[in-house]
Amino acid sequence: MNNTPSSEPPRFASRREELDASYPMGPEKPDEFNIGEMFGNLWDGRWLIFGSIFLFIAAGLVYIYSIAPVYQTEALLQTETPKNFGAQNTPEFTKLEGIYAQPTVAQGEIEILKSNLVLGGVVQALKLDLVAGPVLPPVLGRLLMLDPVNRPQIVVDSFQVPDALRKVPFTLVNLTGNGYSLKGPDGSTLGVGLVGQKVTLDYHGYPVSLQVQSLRGKPGQAFSVALNPQLDAINDLRLRLQVEERGKNTYESANILALTLTAGDPFMVAQTLNEILHAYLRQAIERKVGDSSKALKLLEAQLPVVQAQVADAETRLNSYRRQYGAVDVPREGEMYLQQGSSLDSEISALRQKKQELLRTFTDKADVVVTVDEQIAHLMAEAKRNDEKVTALPLTQQEVVRLTRNAQIKSDQYTSLANSIQGLQNTLAGAVGNARVVDFAIPPHDPISPKKKVLMTLFLFLGAVVGFSLSALRRILHRGIEDHRVIESKLGWPILVTIPHSGAQRSHDRAIGKRVHGHHLLAANDPDDLATESFRSLRTALHFAMEGAATGTVMVTGPAPQIGKSFVSSNLAVVLAQGGGRVLLVDADMRKGSLHRTFGIEKRLGGLSEVLGGRLDYAQVCQKTQVPGLSLITTGALPADPLVLLMSPAFAAFVTQVSAAFDFVVFDATPLLAVSDALIIGSKTDSILMVAKYGAHPLDELRTCQKRMKALESRMKGCVFNDIKLVGMRAVYGYYKYDYSYSYSRHDA
């Protein structure tokens, strides 16, 4: 048979014309939507999808346990609005007032609740500007804090630093024996202290005072202690506090305030919110009775002075009586005495009233001027009364003067004491304009992180990313999955399609572990679908090789890892099972490994020794466990296999073995990697191209076709290998393969 014809064989020309008519060479039309193919693509990328989901779930768990939980509690407060009485207090007026009213009392109280006056007192009372806690690694630290018994903990009674050192962290290191050491921000040790005792240390001339109430942790455990600026602590508390009005309708406000606070500790958040309520109530009462409280303090300060004046007046009167004996005051003198005492009491009352008015009005106000006129009138009356007293004898005048002075001081003391008692009663019964409806209760579960929601979100993101990566892999890797594309675009006939074999994976593992014995699918698993495909290949090859001078066949492919050796070895097995004398030659003298498939430990004594002239082919030809099948391994891997293949020895070797065997199958090197396959193919009568499902872009196969242009007449067809038959996708391109018929060993 002529190996280098000058024209294309009629078989290929007719085949190409038929395929060109069925499949035009223009752009491929987009496939119609096929839900089975879509699920099949997802199944192909299942490990990528599952891996993405697993990574996102792991990331979600790390995120959930690396952030501190946030707890939230709530309290209710009701404020009172002054009522308007009169003709305008009607339903119609109430509606109009609700529409055009100024901000309600509740809105003003919200601002007071968030004021520095209230929150500043809370920060001082609970020491919220003091920050102390263990120094832990980011993720593992959160896991340690989940143990409520053994987790490190510190409670600081007081920590005082100058303003210049506020917000500067100090480090406290736990020592044995209930002690600790304190380090400055620069890492220098300031000194040591004991739990429960106050210690004052020096840091670059600044005094640092610390008292630790309790300390729990292993020796060497570090704790961070810092005192934040008070304004920062107030602002932080204000940010975590939310106050809103509830129960408000269109026309009227219910003045119900809902206070919500968040914090990292469930008990601390409730304690803080309750302290805010108490601070607000205290300032509300102080605001309401502020003037009375100031007046009470002023009167209490005057009371001892007046009491001393009363005692002094009574002492003077008694001393005068003892000195001059009992002096009776005439009836006229008693009248002058009573009038003088009454006038002095009224003058004293008016002066006290004037002092109260001056807190609100100026000296020139009408009401203050009126009081001054009344005081002047009474003083003129008192002066005239004193002139009448001067008409009495001197002894009686002095008695009247001393008696009146003592009575005036006594009346002042009594009036002052009554005023103090009245103010005390007022303060004791004073209530603010608000009441607490519900106090805060420590929450049981945190509001953040929401573990179920976050894990669902991470699961969803993992699935989305996995599907996206699977689709992207599908888009970027445009390997041929429809064998008819090869027929239509290249004109190569597809002799057989070989499905993916699960049994072959066990053989591959055995080959990798160097298990003794041959590992051939066609010999060990005759009922496998792939084995049946090899039988179909044997039949197709029988018709394709009609007219060939010899039974020499080269098996090659575009690239490694496509199943070239798998096809050549199992093809040789089914050819031998068909009754022929078959020789399998491992012609890949670069990385050939067929000797492992047949359980042969060493490759020495093979093709390279024959081509080098050191051995005869009969000496290296090994019988296998498959009847009728012989094997020649690669032999020792030469430095330059191409030189041996281009030598006359290789042509002579092909002539000898083709005469001795019915079929000689050459397992050649990949076509695009090296040129060995072109030399081998030029010495054989038939060439089989192996293409793997989804592994080759069309351009890769076109390159193979160009390189084999001179050997196109020897090209018998293509073997489409490793088609993945899965439950969700049994559709290859446009139609379905259904292998439902197989041989049974029990059939009669």
Image: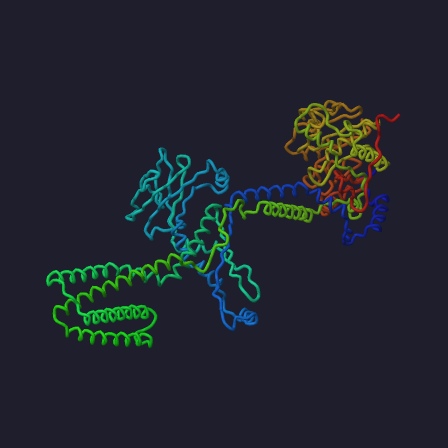
Residue farthest toward the left in the current orientation of the protein = 323
**Where in the figure is residue 124, as x and y percent of width and height?**
38, 52
**Of the pair 724 and 390, the residue shown nearer to us:** 390
Q: Compared to 175, does 156 lie above or below?
A: below
**Residue sitting at x 60%, y 43%:** 57
Number of numbered labels in the structure image? 0
Q: Compared to 680, does 227 lie above or below?
A: below
**Where in the figure is residue 417, as x and y percent of width and height?**
29, 60
Residue 334 lies left or right of residue 276; in this view the side is left
Residue farthest toward the right in the current orientation of the protein = 748
**Residue sitting at x 10%, y 61%:** 323
**Where in the figure is residue 105, as x and y percent of width and height?**
48, 64
Residue 629 lies left or right of residue 135; in this view the side is right
Q: Compared to 538, does 48 lie above or below?
A: below
**Of the pair 334 and 727, the residue shown nearer to us:** 334
Q: Quadrant of the C terminus?
A: top right
Q: Quadrant of the N terminus?
A: top right
**Where in the figure is residue 257, as x and y percent of width and height?**
51, 58
Q: Is residue 652 visible?
A: no
Location of residue 479 by image quarter:
top right
Q: Is residue 74 visible?
A: yes
**Of the pair 301 and 203, the residue shown nearer to us:** 301
**Residue sitting at x 43%, y 51%:** 275
Q: Compared to 181, does 353 lie above or below?
A: below
